[in-house]
Image (cartoon, helix red, strand yellow):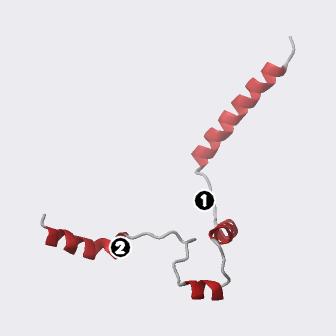
Amino acid sequence: MTVIDALKFTKKHLLEEHWQPSITDRSPRSEWEKSGSKNIIERAREKIEEILATHKVKPLEKDVEREMAKIIKEKQKLSRNKTKIT
């Protein structure tokens, strides 16, 4: 691959592959100040609140749920047996 080929590849893929965390603020200072001057901790807390408010947990598949219940029941039984004084 030549340097020209590498530059073409970079130009083609740069915007597709570039990732920026959603809690960073890359705007100019004047815009950042107008929008409330939130630091990264404040933006992270807001993101956490948003995720907790909107995230929907997918239910477990029935066979997975049954297997987990079976494991829990077995462990509870073992735990009860260990606490008995003989």
Residue at x 66% of width, y 35% of height: 70
Q: CA–CA distance between discs 2 and 1?
A: 29 Å
- Pick the front one: 56 or 34: 34
Q: How many marks?
A: 2
Give x and y (percent) for residue 59: 62, 56
Q: Nearer the viewer, mark 2 or mark 1?
A: 2
User: Position of 77 compared to 33: left or right?
Assistant: right
| Three-letter code for the amino acid on which mark 1 is drawn | Lys
Which residue corresponds to mark 1? Answer: 58
- Contact flag, marks 2 and 1 (Cβ < 8 Å): no
Q: SS at mark 2?
A: helix
Residue at x 51% of width, y 68% of height: 21
Residue at x 68% of width, y 65% of height: 52
Which residue corresponds to mark 2? Answer: 16
| Three-letter code for the amino acid on which mark 2 is drawn | Glu
Give x and y (percent) for residue 57: 63, 60
- Pick the front one: 9 or 83: 9
Name the quadrant containing residue 15: bottom left
Question: How busy is the neighbourhood of tag 2: few (under 14 within 10 Å), some, or many (20 plus)?
Answer: few
